[in-house]
Image (spheres, rainbow, N blue to C red):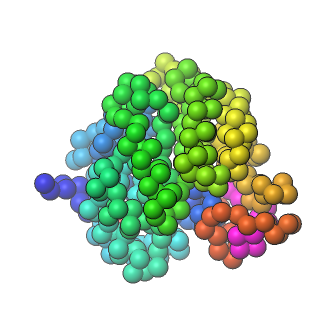
């Protein structure tokens, strides 16, 4: 088998790390993001369908060797490189070579993935990653079968593997689609599983759906749905629950679970107040799970296209 997308990309962009979304991994820093073409799932609601669902030669407009990507990240002041837009599992050989080149330059690596990968492939792939955001698309096998052409259990296995058997920083995202995966009962069951298998400190992002690809007739997610999901998850003892794709200061910001102080204020992808000293709350000294440096980065939340090839 030959990876025909090796060394070729649908484009490179500098993003805020919060856009991945990662809220507890080098906050305020920039990340060099890229993907290729194709996917190993068939999601009807795909919000990057113009990249993941097209023939590769229609979208692969840039090219770069692994060493060139690492060098570009360093040149542009990016603390990390993200494999995103389409699932890096389908361009694993390229992603792994880029990750090795990044480690040589002290650049972190981020996998934005659906977690749909075999048990045999997981160790090699995630051994090269420093952080991952995994899409948990729903909490029923029926949803995965009908809307993603896949299965739920391999994703749950990946999440449990990352939490229990690796040092990869893990965050989880669930896109809530009205009438399909947003019922309080489903979120309640998912929260119970999350607490039991991933613990209380793994951040979970509930994000708003907008009509796209093959679900153009489905309405946008009401903000109240996200707020209710956040309340349910927090009621199960989960400490870092976020809302996304909506403007919600409370749901987008990080709060100390011990004293309630505002730790990291966010307005969309831009950071305001920053009240962490290392990984501790400045008010009470409570320890906050995550990968934090001496302070917030200076990237202002904008997105910037970069040409490498």
As drawn, 123 above or below 89? below
Residue 256 can be seen in this image: yes
Which image quadrant: the C terminus? bottom left
Segment tinted magenta in the rendering: 270-280
Q: Position of residue 48 (x, y in %)?
A: 42, 41
- Say which of 41 and 272 sits in front: 41
In the figure, is residue 178 to the left or right of 2?
A: right
Q: Residue at x 53, y 62 (%)?
A: 169
Please identify the dominant SS of the magenta region: strand
Which image quadrant: the N terminus? bottom left
As drawn, 25 above or below 220? below
In the figure, is residue 198 to the left or right of 62?
A: right
Q: Residue at x 45, y 62 (%)?
A: 165
Q: Is residue 156 magenta?
A: no
Q: Position of residue 108 (x, y in %)?
A: 48, 70
In the figure, is residue 158 to the left or right of 226?
A: left
Instruction: State the residue lying farthest toward the front.
Output: 196
Residue 299 can be seen in this image: no
As drawn, 182 above or below 290? above
Q: Residue at x 38, y 67 (%)?
A: 127
Q: Position of residue 20 (x, y in %)?
A: 53, 53
- Say which of 34 and 285 sits in front: 285
As drawn, 39 above or below 227? below
Residue 214 sits in quarter:
top left
Q: Is residue 271 magenta?
A: yes
Q: Residue at x 37, y 43 (%)?
A: 154
Q: Position of residue 181 (x, y in %)?
A: 53, 27
């Amino acid at each position: 088998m030959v990876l025909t997308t090796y060394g070729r990309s649908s484009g490179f962009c500098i993003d805020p790390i919060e856009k991945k979304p990662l809220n507890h991994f080098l906050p305020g820093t920039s990340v060099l993001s890229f993907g290729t073409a194709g996917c190993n799932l068939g999601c009807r609601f795909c919000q990057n369908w113009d990249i993941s669902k097209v023939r590769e030669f229609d979208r692969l407009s840039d090219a770069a060797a692994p060493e060139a990507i690492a060098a570009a990240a360093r040149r542009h002041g990016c603390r990390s490189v993200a494999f995103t837009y389409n699932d890096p599992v389908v361009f694993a050989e390229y992603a792994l070579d880029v990750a090795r080149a990044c480690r040589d330059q002290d650049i972190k690596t981020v996998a934005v993935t659906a977690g749909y990968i075999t048990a045999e492939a997981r160790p090699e792939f995630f051994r090269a990653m420093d952080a991952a955001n995994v899409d948990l698309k729903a909490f029923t096998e029926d949803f995965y079968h009908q809307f993603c052409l896949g299965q739920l259990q391999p994703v749950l296995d990946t999440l449990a593997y990352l939490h229990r058997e690796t040092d990869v920083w893990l965050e989880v995202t669930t896109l809530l689609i009205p009438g399909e995966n947003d019922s309080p009962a489903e979120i309640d069951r998912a929260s119970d599983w999350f607490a039991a298998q991933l613990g209380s400190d793994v951040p979970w992002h509930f994000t708003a759906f907008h009509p796209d690809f093959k679900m153009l007739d489905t309405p946008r997610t009401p903000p109240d749905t996200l707020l209710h999901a956040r309340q349910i998850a927090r009621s199960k003892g989960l400490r870092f629950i976020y809302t996304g794709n909506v403007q919600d200061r409370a749901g987008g910001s990080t709060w100390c679970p011990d004293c309630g102080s505002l730790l990291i204020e966010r307005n969309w992808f831009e950071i305001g107040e920053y009240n962490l000293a290392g990984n501790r709350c400045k008010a009470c000294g409570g320890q906050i799970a995550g990968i934090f440096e001496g302070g917030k980065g200076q990237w202002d939340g904008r997105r910037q296209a970069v040409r490498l090839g």
